[in-house]
Image (cartoon, helix red, strand yellow):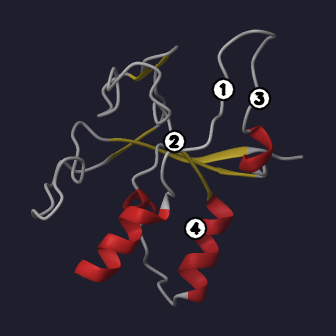
Amino acid sequence: MNIAIKAIYISSGHDFVGRHGKGRLDHGIEKVDTVECLAGRGIVNDRYLDHEEDFKGQITFFDWDVYDRIRTQCNLPDLDPALFRRNVLTSGVDLNTLIGLRDRPRSRRLFERPRRPARTNIERRRVAG
């Protein structure tokens, strides 16, 4: 198995949260080489750091192979992976197999299902643009 991190992104602010019926904000998203993760809190300098107690989106993952299939099947060769607004794009691991995984017995789960599907923001972009 060859697991790789293909890209890491952070954003300082929310573009969509609390914006129903309003225009999108533009906080941008920054590609970085490394991040500092704080247990139970999130990623330093990311919009979801200390967002709310026990928040399930402290760090988000997206499968690079899914990104690549979308790019190919939708004929979008220049699709920027940052548009998914997910923190870590990975390859070589089925992310669904990590759901419920813990780093040690009786500890917090490392991976949990998100409250809403990751495709929501992409669908909004497709409708808007």
Mark 3 and mark 2 residues within 8 Å of each other at the beta carbon: no
**Which residue position holds label 2?**
60
Q: Amino acid at mark 3?
A: Leu
Which kind of residue does numbered mark 4 sit on? Tyr
Q: Residue at x 9, y 62 (%)?
A: 22
In the rendered view, tell whether residue 70 sits above or below residue 58. Answer: below
Earlier residue among tags 3 and 1: 3
Q: Percent position (x, y) of residue 122?
A: 40, 69
Q: Secondary structure at mark 4?
A: helix
Q: Residue 101, which numbered label?
A: 3
Q: Are marks 4 and 1 in contact (CB under 8 Å)?
A: no
* Other residues around mark 1 within 10 Å, as few (<14) / some (14–19) / many (≥20): some
Nearest the eye: 11 or 48: 48
Question: Which numbered mark, 3 or 4, is in the foreground of this view?
Answer: 3
Disc 1 target residue: 110
Marks 4 and 2 sit apart, C-alpha to C-alpha, by: 14 Å
How would you rate the neighbour count of disc 2 (Cα within 10 Å): few for under 14, some for 14-19, many for 20 or more?
Answer: some
The mark tally for this picture is 4
Quadrant of the rendered image containing residue 121: bottom left
Per the model, the C-alpha gap separating discs 4 and 1 is 23 Å
